Image: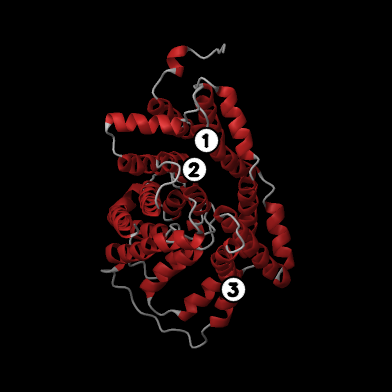
Amino acid sequence: MVYFMPEFIINLPALVKTFIAFFSILILYRLGMALGVSILIASAMLTLSGSSPMKSLLFQAAGFAKAENWLLIIVLLLILCFTESLQKSGRMEGTIAGLKQWLADHNLLLMGLPALVGLLPMPGGALFSAPFVNSIDAEQRLEPAHKTAINYWFRHIWEFWWPLYPGVIFAIHYSKLSYATFMALLVPLTAISVAGGYFFMLRKTAAPRAAASQQKRSGEISAALFPIALLIAVALCGSIVLQKFDMQKIHANLGALLIGLILSLGIIVIKTPRSVAQAARSQATIKTFLLLLVVIAIQSFSFAITAPANDSGATLVSLMRDEMIHLRIPVFVVVILVPFIAGLVTGVAFAFVGASFPLIFALLGADPAFNIIASATVLAYVSGYTGMIVSPIHVCFVVTAEYFKISLFKAYPYIWRPALTVFLSGAALSWLYYYILV
């Protein structure tokens, strides 16, 4: 066929094409271009660099027509509305106020309040908990860099498995694991993150103990957290039940999460109907549009690397796999480096998942064994998380440092050791899953 693309570009190795496209995403994003637009440009580059662009475009169009891709968009929109409703209804603030009366140990409060706010994903959410962390240290025993690190670190301990985080949803989507399985594999990293944060940030902190309030607000805390607990329970149990009706795993996961979101939003509507309406109206912004654009762009990138790249029907992924075998590049090196770099440059979980997971899981082949999927999922996610948590452009990191009026680089001495602990622990878990889940 007649094709305008120069032949030397068409004949480039698949590895070269894919990594040019991947680093183009990072460069364009760092230059200020919207992430979704950056990924769409990279997808177009991959599509046009093959010898059969029409086959690739038809493949991508068929992919967008699949039900799970529309379900994913609907679920993400409802999650944005749900988290905003929790904030506008005052449930999260009530829980925080209750905990401040309930707990006497200042170190538990220093860990617990940012962690509690972390249950409610929102851009720059660490700024919401920073004033509470500062108020706990009323005697100013901790230096601002120390409080910055505490607030930032414990804000993100749930991001390995908490289903309100878009990065977790994307990871489940591309790994094709059930939510219950994904949670079981990744939840140990939350415990390790808490232990690492305590050991390196709070163990030697001589915080005074305050007398606990005699009026514990456990009822208020329970009422505030009930919609979240309901969502988690339905997402966990529902995905298992729906699969019993011969529903595909990916449809069961998203369907259960959708049902849980509807029920949880219903609880909030009954109690505070205006908060949900306000939350829905607040989503009609350019930020919501850009998030949806990222979702669509990530799907496009995934389709581009798994679409026919030449007249023989070979995909970029299959070509890359052949080239890696020829060059003897270990797959685990790709699984570590690609998510880490994406996390470091973007500072966003759904960005490192979206930019790297389609490539990684496509490289594993059409039907990899469960132990390979589990091992790759954990290693890729913990690598990307490590890059994200040490990224100097992570919004939560930046706004916390600004609140405490310090250079964010002063917080790194407190952060790098727990971050390294989490990465090494995740790598060890990945190795363990590979050998015991056969």
Question: Taking 334 as reference, is 192 above or below it?
Answer: below
Task: For marks 1 and 3, give the one nearer the viewer.
Answer: 1
| Among the 4 quarters of the image, the one containing residue 85 | bottom right
Residue 226: image tag = 3
Question: Is residue 123 visible in the rendered structure shown here?
Answer: yes
Distance, label 1 to label 2, CA atoms, is 8 Å
Q: Give the residue type that dot 1 points to.
A: Phe
The numbered mark, 2 or 3, whose residue comes first in the sequence reads 3
* Residue 359 vertical placement versus 80 (above, below): above
Separation (CA) of disc 1 from disc 3 = 37 Å
The label on residue 301 is 1
* Vertical order, 213 against 12 (above or below): below
Camera-side residue: 205 or 363?
363
Q: Residues within 10 Å of mark 1 (few under 14, many from 20)?
A: many
Image-quadrant location for residue 93: bottom right
Q: Secondary structure at mark 3?
A: helix
Residue under label 2, please give it.
Answer: 354
Q: Are marks 2 and 3 in contact (CB under 8 Å)?
A: no
Rendered location of residue 321, percent (x, y): 37, 34
**In front of the other: 335 or 385:** 335
- Residue 257: percent from left, percent from top: 60, 60
**Sequence order check: which comes first, mark 1 or mark 3?**
3
Tally of numbered tags:
3
Q: Give the number of the mark in front: 2 or 3.
A: 2
Residue 386: give its label: none
Q: Residue at x 48, y 67 (%)?
A: 116
Name the N-terminal-most of marks 1 and 2: 1
